[in-house]
Image (spheres, grey):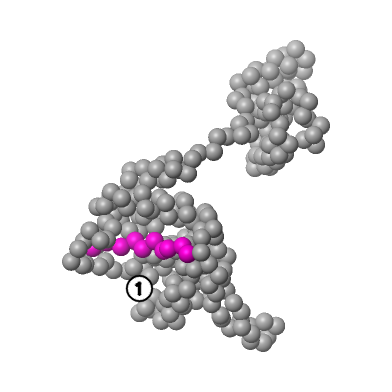
Amino acid sequence: MAASLMLFAEIVVIQEPAKAGEQFVSSIAAALKGAEYRGTVKAVTLPEKDARALWLTYKDTAQFTAALEQVITATPPIDLYPEVPRTADLIFQVRNLLTRHLFFRNPRSPLLIAVWILGTYIYQSFTVFGYLWANSAEKRSGKSRLLEFLEKLTSNATPRLSNVNVATIFRLANKQQTLILDELENLKGEDKEAYQGVIQLLNTGFQAGAKVARCLKVDGEWDVGFFECFCPKALHPSRTYRTRSRTDHLKFS
């Protein structure tokens, strides 16, 4: 279809209401981009449901044409080839977002976190990918708030997981999600099996190709299955840690 439209200098798509209309426009734009179309593309929303309804409103060719052209003129074109920001620019944008909402004792910490966030999108390019440990020397310093940001900014992130069983944690890792583990040490007292499972995952899951073996029931019989455990992980302990040198830890508020 896109090949038949390449001769036109301008293409106007009438976008109907609801999600189906958005998906239709997106599919057209993707097809034109794939064909390297260089003309102008517009997705117009009519004052009526569709072109037929607009025609029935005026029932006059001149008025209908004028109304349609007015809408087309007022609609900005779709940018099929938006400029891709440099990685360095993205890092500093994420850092600035973090510093607007969180206080960091060490000014280098938000830059480190921003790099880690972008790394979650390409972590499979590395043989080793470190964990982000949200820790501080004081209570109520904003560690949970940081995890809320990580939920929104990291690749394929889970919600904050505070009570999770062993089967769930291994399956989430196997799906290559970014694990946001909150109140991690509470599991040690509440669910020792889950805690041991998380520790097993952490002990191996920083390195590409790492797997853990678990017993699975298949067709009524038990068998051994292997789960991938290499994925990004952000951790929040259930308590703060006081040390002689507070500057070794991050502080958020």
Magenta highlight on residue 135: yes
> Which residue is rendered at x = 61% and y = 31% of the image?
79
Task: From this view, report whether residue 168 is shown above or below residue 75.
Answer: below
Viewer can see residue 54: no
Viewer can see residue 18: yes
Q: Amino acid at mark 1?
A: Glu
Whole-percent x, y for residue 175 in the image: 57, 65
> Which residue is rendered at x = 21% and y = 67% of the image?
242
Residue nearer the viewer, 196 or 36:
36
Left or right of 50, for residue 101:
left
Whole-percent x, y for residue 123 in the image: 51, 58
Q: Secondary structure at mark 1?
A: loop
Say which quarter of the image contains residue 174: bottom right
Highlighted magenta segment, given as a residue range = 128-137
Whole-percent x, y for residue 210 in the image: 53, 72
Magenta highlight on residue 200: no
> Which residue is rendered at x = 56% and y = 80% of the image?
213
Residue nearer the viewer, 50 or 94:
94
Task: From this view, report whether residue 192 is shown above or below residue 176.
Answer: below
Hey, which residue is sitting farthest bottom in the picture? 221
> Which residue is rendered at x = 38% and y = 53% of the image?
113
Left or right of 87, for residue 216:
right
Predominant SS of the magenta segment: loop
- Give neighbour class at mark 1: few <14, some 14-19, many 20+ (Cα, 10 Å): some
Whole-percent x, y for residue 42 in the image: 66, 28
- Quarter of the picture containing the N terminus is top right
From the image, tell me which residue sits under label 1. 185
Task: From this view, report whether residue 71 is shown above or below residue 90.
Answer: above
